[in-house]
Amino acid sequence: MKISSRRKFIEDSFKVTVAVAVGGPIILDSAAAFAANQDHVAKANGDDGPLKFVQAPLGFSYASLEPNIDALTMEIHYTKHHTAYIKNVNDAIVAEKLNYSSEKEFFDNASKLSAKARNNGGGAWNHNFFWASLKPGTSSGPDGKVKDTITNAFGSVDKFKELFTQAALTRFGSGWAWLVNDNGTLKITSTANQDNPLFDKAEVKGTPLLALDVWEHAYYLKYQNKRNEYIANWWNVVNWDEVNKRLG
């Protein structure tokens, strides 16, 4: 089943000076990640309505990431898990009479939300971000600005991949690994469950640039308990063009 092409995922970048964690400073245009999917949200909400999360189209067929991610996993992940997060957070918004007008405002108040609103809101946003981070074909790795930025921050692309892989492997239980811009510094972090670095009390806050879902439902049909193999093959389908857009 083919999904129609998705809209531009991140818009309206702003300039920041990045003092990278390793190496010298560079100038980086970083997208405001909370604006991801805002065109869909705006159309769903109208001009005056309360926030409503919207599931972004995949932009590729379920089978197009094979052999790295299998079609059945993609179909279940998108149509069951992600769809449920969208429905549940919107139900919570209505039932709890939440009046937030944007995803940014929602996450700025994450610590005040009910478990249902928080967990499903994170799941809704995280997956929209994750789908846009994937691309059919075999990735040759980062190039251009993102390659230069990562090399300056971590010493090399290989070192970055090693550190990111370790963050994903060592996230106990379910969660996510992230590359973020934290007030001008590139950092690798991970979050539990459906939390993300935009939450008001995230351990490491920042603008997400790349994310990896390490919930078992993301890989268990194909890889079973071999999370390491899933991560290694995921690098083959990273959408580095999208990461470059997020840099601006």
Image: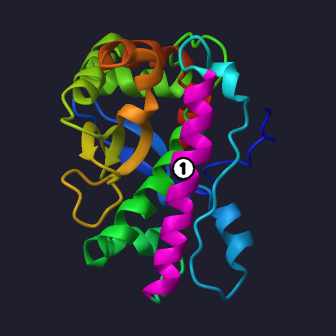
* Vertical comparison of 18 with 105: above or below: above
- Range covered by the magenta-colored residues: 71-96
* Vertical comparison of 152 with 138: above or below: below
Percent from the top left, x then y, of residue 49? 65, 86
- Residue placed at 74% from the left, 45% from the top? 6
| Of 223 and 125, the residue lying toward us | 223
Q: Is residue 187 visible?
A: yes
| Of 23 and 151, the residue lying toward us | 151
- Residue placed at 66% from the left, 14% from the top? 137
State the predominant SS element of the stretch in magenta. Answer: helix
* Vertical comparison of 125 with 17: above or below: below
Q: In the picture, residue 176 is in which quadrant? A: top left
Q: Within 10 angstroms of label 1, few (less than 14), some, or many (20 or more) residues?
A: many
Q: Is residue 26 magenta?
A: no
Circle 1: residue type? His
- Residue placed at 39% from the left, 71% from the top? 117
Which part of the image, by quadrant, shows the N terminus? top right
* Vertical comparison of 95 with 38: above or below: below
Q: How many marks?
A: 1
Percent from the top left, x then y, of residue 5? 79, 40
Q: Is residue 74 magenta?
A: yes
Which part of the image, by quadrant, shows the C terminus? top right
> Regarding mark 1 in the picture, which secondary structure is present there?
helix
The residue that label 1 is drawn on is: 82
